[in-house]
Amino acid sequence: MPELPEVEALKDFLTENLVGHEIVRVLPVAISVLKTYDPPVTAVEGHEVTAMHRYGKFLDLATADGPHLVTHLARAGWLHWKDQLPSGMPRPGKGPLALRVALETGAGFDLTEAGTQKRLAVYLVQDPQQVPGVARLGPDPLAEDFDETRFAALLKDERRRLKGALRDQSLIAGVGNAYSDEILHVAKMSPFKLASSLTSEETARLYEALRTTLTEAVERSRGVAAGRLKAEKKSGLRVHGRTGEPCAVCGDTIREVSFSDSSLQYCPTCQTGGKPLADRRMSRLLK
């Protein structure tokens, strides 16, 4: 799933390639991708793109005196930029293509989604806050006003475990499964530690790990073409998706805990005092 650093990089890439151009065609190929119907998604046609914004993991394409095309790539969605889009009409039900956006230059992008779980979402709204997921977002962890005091206040009465708290978009926007693993590894904390139990020193350490991990990931992704962002993300991860590999910090073997629909990875030596966590499919541990 694309998280804050990848979506930020996509925002920068699209700012360079979309802003100042006119949208001439929007072709929804999979009806499941559309989460709003009035106005229709084609209402953005004929409008010039004026800016790209990011809200957590949401991409916002803003147009001149017109609507916003807001996208959430979900777990298996992606954006593919094409300097020259195919001339023919895409065929519904054939392949992963969900929606195509064409510019007056002939360039544009495709939104695709792999797999059978159709969670890719596109909204056409007058205000991004009309999108329920955007309206529920907590503060952006890379915002200038997101300081350690604000972070500590969020965790003070949080009774969930750190892994679940960091992934909650209404608490902190933009962090998902992969970067929560990375942040906790940098902070040297167990994913099952209760958020409200942190000492002031631990809170400071976790805040620093949060900001540093995301900032470094954004810098690695910046300037990378959209098609290479997935590979760039994977190459920069130290524990997530690396079960069975040696920890880059201490050399211990990276372990995994599996749940009903996801998994987490961690280093026992760095994070849990050398003790492996029980690997049980108990999704309630992340609630």
Image (cartoon, helix red, strand yellow):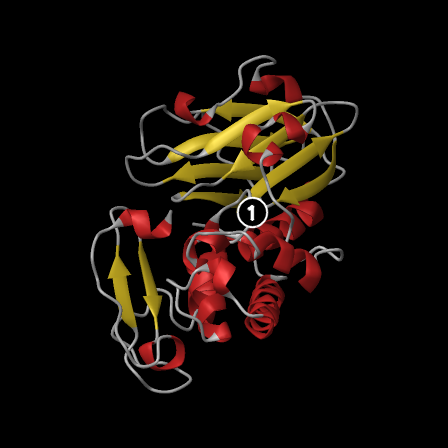
| Residue 16 percent location from the top left of the image | 70, 49
Q: Position of residue 240 (x, y in %)?
A: 38, 65
* Residue position marked by numbered label 1 in the rendering: 171
Q: For this view, does 102 lie left or right of residue 114?
A: right
The x and y percentages for residue 179 are 47, 61
**Picture residue at 42% right of the left edge, 49% below the top:** 1
Furthest-top residue in view? Answer: 38
**Residue 21 vertical placement versus 146 (above, below):** above
Q: Secondary structure at mark 1?
A: loop
Residue 277 drawn above or below residue 67: below
- Left or right of residue 90, residue 37 in this image: right
Judge by depth and name the residue closer to the eye, 100 or 172. 172
At label 1, counting other C-alpha atoms closer than 10 Å, the crowd grade (few under 14, some 14-19, many 20 or more) is some
Count of marks placed on residues:
1
Instruction: Say which quarter of the image contains residue 29.
Output: top left
Q: Is residue 208 above or below residue 104?
A: below
Residue 229 percent across, percent down from the top left: 50, 58
Q: Amino acid at mark 1?
A: Leu
State the residue at coordinates (46%, 52%): 159
Task: Name the residue furthest right.
Answer: 65
Q: Quadrant of residue 49?
A: top right
Q: Is residue 147 visible?
A: no
Q: Is residue 253 visible?
A: yes
In this view of the protein, which residue sits in the foreground, 49 or 157?
157
Q: Residue at x 57, y 56 (%)?
A: 156
